Image (cartoon, coloured by chain):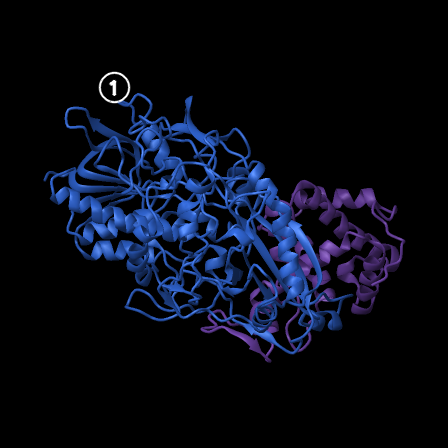
Chain colours: A blue, B purple
Amino acid sequence: MNGNTYDAIVVGTGISGGWAAKELCEKGLKTLVLERGRDVEHIKDYDDMVPNWEFPHRGRITNEDRKISPVQSGVYNYNERSKKYFVNDTDNPYIQIKPFEWARGYQVGGRSLIWGRQCYRRSYLDFEANAKDGFGIDWPIRYKDIEPWYDYIEPFVGISGSAEGLPHLPDSKFQPPMPMNCVEEEVAKRIKGKFADRRLIIHGRTANYTEKKGPQRGKCQYKGSCGAGHACSFGAYFSSNSATLPAAAQTGNMTLRPYSMVQEVYYDKEKKRATGVRVVDTETMKQYDFFAKVIFVNASTLNTTAILLNSKSDVFPYGLGNSSGQLGHNLMDMPYGMGAQGIFEGFEDKFAFGNRPTGIFVPRFRNINKDTERKDYVRGFTYQGGAGRGRSGSFGFGREFKEGLKKPADHWSMAITAWAEHLPYYENRMFLHNEKKDKYGMPVICVDCEFKENEAAMVNDMMNSAAEILEAGGLKQVQTYNRNKIPGSCIHETGTARMGKDPKTSVLNRWNQMHDVPNVFITDGSAMCSSGTTPGPSITYMALTARAVDYAVKELNRRNI
Amino acid sequence: MERRAFIIKGGLGLGAIGFSIWITNGCKSRETSGLNEMFSAENISLINEIGETVIPTTNTPGAKSAKVGEYIAIIVQDCFSENEKKEFKDTLEHINELSNASYGNSFMKCIEKERVHIISKIEEEYEDFKSFKDLIVSAYLSSKVGMTQFFNYSPVPGRFNGCTSIRPW
């Protein structure tokens, strides 16, 4: 093996790239892991223990931030401390044919350093939905195919939550749930049995340890920094940096190369295999070639697709493995931000202590069976939310005003917000600009994506059902809201290199293996056939990655690839 | 809370122009704070003193010890829109203007009783003082003094209790 040849190459170090690296290395493959951004070393490079007052703007976004990064600075957890984990929009342009907020993090760990951490398994309903209602193409797998892989990865990820035994929201291998506060518990109790469609409030499921396991990962300290996009020095928060990459490194099989932007996957038409990748060093702008027997592309949905579209050859003039013409199409995100809020009368002498990095969850209750079928839309939605109690306002100024700043709010308040399914539409897509290139020479990505009738048809129901739940739970002054989020802002972009049974209509087979190029695997969000009704897609990418690596290594050993 | 309808947005009339010269030219011709281009050291002291009137030293340190002026100067310069910047500067001007009109002295030279009177009047009559005051509060509460001496500081709570009788802040 010479200096630039490996058994395997992994492109990207986010949630799915980290898992690909860990699994390939643990199976004994010499693996080159390529990351376009800088290295971020677990604990050493974090600043979550630096007090807020030591930051010049104490977390605020500056005018300069807004100018340099107009998109990233609008992402919900972008702030003075987390902004180093977001890209600079000026150096990393993309074109919004229609409004599309694309959050990106180019560093070792990728967006696993800034993710929302909610983890929900997909259910049989999600895998059967396309076949049932005809939107998109049928998933080539069913829940039973992925179930053992959820079982395999979850103890390592560390998901806190409660087992509920719901067929439409399968339980994970849980660590103990993070407790509800008194108002959430009371509201959950009050709504039980009040709805014919069995709406219920359960513990949020989040990738934060609640038990200490091993030297790398401690349990959550409830300091509230992961919600603000700060990495966790206690390692309670699952990221590539805290978990998968250290495991990969421990095998001695991983070579991690930061500042390595993959622009193209090479294809050999005689061998009918991909041979390697072309990398631009983002520090020196020099080009390098690396070669391997198997390549996992985990650059995140849009960038993975861009690399493939940019990998043109005689055989694949429209991009590697794009004989179906589907590459770049069927882009989905998830509509969210519709909900309701109200105040709770009671528990005025109680408070919550500690900053819990999760909340409560309302599982899907629409279109589960005949009784819950809707005439006006297909699929469904879920809610995330929670109750809390802040401080009340103070009036005037001076000594009394100052003391008034400590006064708690008269009441607890509670809010729940919906996340919904986005159907796969062929015309929602990304493609590469014909002429425009970024400073690294990579064609600029154009995104043309919107929510359509089915998504719009859910909006009122998401607001009204939220209000019904809160009212049934005894909340007062209930008001609905719609945050009017644009596509992309959910940061669940998926679908542009989808799996499928038929090579004519899909890019990947049931093993996340390219139909056209059997030694290329794609296990990030681009592989999805549907967005799913329940958010928290990352856990599914992780399970699919472990499953695909297992298959790829078996196929290598059988000399099939 | 009922507020009197008498709200002045544009200015008190008296000397408004003079004061805008003071604030725009002032920071160039005088010694700047070293922190930024927008505010002189005097401006920052003035913000600190206004802050101290709003959040005085009691059994815990007040806004001046928390150096709200230094922080606010950075925030206004780096984070505020042009409109917000103007609104902030106008409010500062009006405070000094009212001080001069009422006591023939700048706010800095007024004694505590006079300062209290000035801020009462501004709060009553000048709508934009609300966001000015909010900024003082946010500067104080986010400072080391605010976070560790005014409030109970638990950077690493270590546990979550969703139903406690002890106020956590």
Q: Find the residue positioned furthest to the left.
A: A1
Image quadrant where residue B72 sits: bottom right
Q: Identify the residue under disc 1.
A: A314
Closer to the camera in the image, A81 or A330: A330
Q: Amino acid at mark 1?
A: Asp
Closer to the camera in the image, B154 or A450: A450
Image quadrant where residue A195 sits: bottom right
Q: Is A555 placed left or right of A17 in the picture?
A: left
Q: Secondary structure at mark 1?
A: loop
> What residue is drawn where x is 80% and y is 51%?
B94
Task: Identify the subunit bearing mark 1.
Answer: A
> What residue is drawn where x is 45% and y is 47%?
A532
Residue A309 position, x and y percent, is 34, 28
Q: Is residue A343 above or below residue B80?
A: below
Q: Quadrant of the C terminus of chain A?
A: top left
Q: Find the residue positioned furthest to the bottom.
A: B165
Residue B109 appears in the picture as rendered? yes
Residue B139 appears in the picture as rendered? no
